[in-house]
């Protein structure tokens, strides 16, 4: 699939035999579901059970759930051309962007309740006030901090849901409500990097309505990983002894999970202590800065905790941000520490899933050098990458990495495009290697029969014919 038109055809396809069964097998059961809420919004036959999408009624296999899933086919190169139109340079770690700046809201009321500099809340209020959008998909919470997807249509409601929840949330579930109940034409959304991949599919081809539910503004949040609701439900009141009703705000900064209570207590917990509550699919995500958002916002790289670092990526993002600055709603400065953002991006992109030794031992049957096998398996963890990145991850000279990649390319184990490499599907790789083994084995069998066996039989008969009694031997020989 190489063009936008082909992608549109893929998203329009309704007669596919794929459905929830395949979504369950390839996404949910393999723990790569992000619980973004897209399948829940598109299909009334899908619900949630134990923090997982589950089928609650017969599924006629319309295939929308699997096609619009944030974890299934996402043609990043096609969408980069659509969103950025080749005019915006790409930083491998951060993605395509026009500029990076620091910013904060000029409204003290916003800064009191919003996260860090309050840029996200201010931009959303500005977008609603100016009529740029008529609704925003956000995540609220109940009194027990259980995330709740909501549709916000009034600027003064934005602050009531401000602040990060740090718990996985099906934010896109509210998409159905925005389209079918509120009949909203132009939407904004604030989402995690994984959620935004589903948003871009919905933006390209809205499946619920031709008139309503068009995403006009996509704001992404920096994300190293997210957590299961068990962190809130069990760990905070159980291990820390903090009643949920006493919490006024949560934050992640400087490698710590921070809880603010209504009596002024601030509790800081090292992130490594709550690692067990990390959402499973976060282990496989490589996007730290929400690379496909119009604007990405976080705290890393900002000069102080009451500022946000802001990555402006698209023309839409540039227009809405610059207008908020020119009207005095946001103050901005260019003093961003890019190295800190790149460090976090690298940390996430370089996560590697190690294979069991039994797997690597079995692969040795293909007579592949250890260093080539290592690069191939690392590529499967990292995905689309280049030689400098692999050199940095594996601490091997770039020239050696380049030679190994070229060998893998010749062998058919990796694909290369403009100096960027991605692994070939292992099903295809192994099928090709097995086919090669069969061809080589058949060649060797023919050689043994035509060359070795003739001479061996002659030698045997010359010296041992007196010992042969079997009629079958003579039948086979003559």
Image (cartoon, rainbow, N blue to C red):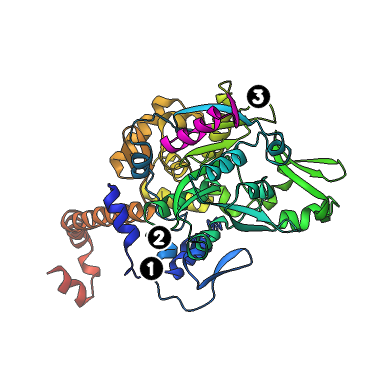
Work out which residue is located at the far bottom of the displayed protein and give it. Answer: 58
Q: Left or right: 427 with respect to 5? A: right
Label 1: how many Cα within 10 Å (few below 14, some 14–19, many 20+) = some
Label 2: how many Cα within 10 Å (few below 14, some 14–19, many 20+) = many
| 373 or 414, nearer to the observer | 414
- In the structure shown, which secondary structural element does the residue marked by tag 3 occupy? loop
Q: Identify the image quadrant of the C terminus.
A: bottom left
Query: Of circles 3 and 2, which is in front?
Result: 3
Contact, mark 2 vs mark 1 (Cβ under 8 Å): yes
| Mark 3 / mark 2, whichever is N-terminal | 2
- Specify start and end residues of the magenta stretch as a single range: 311-332
Determine which residue is flagged by label 1: 18
Contact, mark 1 vs mark 3 (Cβ under 8 Å): no
| Mark 2 / mark 1, whichever is N-terminal | 1
- In the structure shown, which secondary structural element does the residue marked by tag 1 occupy? loop
Work out which residue is located at the far right of the displayed protein and give it. Answer: 263
Residue 383 colored magenta? no
Q: Position of residue 137 (x, y in %)?
A: 55, 53
Q: Quadrant of residue 53?
A: bottom right
How far apart in space, not on screen, are marks 1 and 3 (Cα)?
49 Å
Determine which residue is flagged by label 3: 303
Work out which residue is located at the far top of the displayed protein and give it. Answer: 335
Determine which residue is flagged by label 2: 67
Residue in the picture at 67% in, 34% down: 107
Q: Which numbered circle lies on residue 5? A: none
Q: Quadrant of residue 369?
A: top left
How far apart in space, not on screen, are marks 2 and 1 (Cα)?
9 Å
Q: Position of residue 302 (x, y in %)?
A: 63, 27
Residue in the picture at 41% in, 76% down: 60
Residue in the picture at 32% in, 63% down: 13
């Amino acid at each position: 699939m190489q063009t936008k038109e082909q992608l549109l055809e893929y998203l329009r396809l309704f007669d596919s035999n794929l459905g929830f069964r395949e979504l369950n097998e390839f996404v949910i059961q393999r723990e790569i579901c992000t619980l973004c809420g897209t399948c829940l919004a598109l299909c009334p036959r899908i619900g949630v059970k134990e923090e997982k999408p589950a089928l609650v009624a017969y599924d006629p296999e319309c295939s929308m759930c699997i096609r619009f899933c944030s974890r299934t086919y996402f043609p990043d190169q096609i969408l980069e051309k659509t969103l950025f139109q080749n005019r915006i340079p790409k930083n491998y770690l951060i993605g395509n962007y026009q500029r990076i700046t620091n910013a904060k809201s000029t409204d003290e009321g916003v800064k009191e309740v919003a996260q860090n500099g309050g840029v996200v809340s201010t931009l959303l209020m500005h977008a609603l006030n100016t009529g740029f959008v008529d609704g925003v998909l956000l995540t609220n919470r109940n009194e027990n901090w259980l995330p709740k997807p909501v549709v916000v249509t009034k600027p003064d409601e934005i602050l009531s849901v401000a602040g990060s929840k740090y718990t996985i949330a099906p934010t896109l579930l509210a998409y159905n409500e925005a389209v079918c109940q509120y009949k909203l034409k132009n939407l904004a959304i604030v989402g995690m990097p994984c959620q935004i991949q589903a948003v871009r599919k919905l933006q390209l081809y809205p499946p619920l309505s031709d008139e309503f539910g068009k995403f006009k503004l996509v704001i992404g949040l920096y994300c190293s990983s997210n957590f299961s609701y068990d962190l809130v439900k069990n760990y905070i009141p159980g291990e820390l002894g903090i009643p949920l009703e006493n919490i006024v705000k949560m934050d992640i900064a400087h490698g710590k999970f921070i809880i603010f209570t209504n009596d002024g207590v601030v509790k800081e917990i090292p992130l490594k202590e709550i690692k067990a509550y990390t959402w499973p699919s976060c282990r496989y995500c490589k996007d730290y800065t929400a690379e496909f958002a119009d604007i990405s916002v976080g705290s890393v790289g900002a000069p102080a905790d009451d500022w946000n670092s802001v990555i402006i990526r698209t023309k839409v993002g540039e227009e809405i941000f610059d207008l908020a600055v020119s009207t005095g709603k946001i103050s901005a400065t260019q003093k961003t520490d890019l190295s800190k953002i790149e460090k976090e991006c690298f940390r996430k992109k370089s996560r590697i899933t190690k294979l069991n030794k039994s797997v690597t031992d079995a692969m040795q049957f293909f007579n592949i050098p250890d260093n080539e096998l290592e690069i191939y398996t690392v590529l499967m963890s990292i995905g689309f990458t280049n030689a400098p990145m692999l050199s940095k991850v594996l601490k091997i000279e770039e020239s050696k990495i380049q030679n190994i990649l070229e060998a893998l390319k010749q062998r058919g184990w990796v694909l290369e495009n403009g100096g960027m490499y991605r692994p070939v599907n292992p099903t295809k790789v192994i099928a090709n290697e097995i086919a090669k083994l069969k061809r080589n084995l058949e060649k060797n069998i023919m050689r043994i029969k035509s060359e070795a066996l003739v001479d061996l039989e002659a030698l045997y008969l010359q010296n041992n014919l007196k010992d042969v009694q079997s009629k079958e031997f003579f039948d086979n020989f003559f």
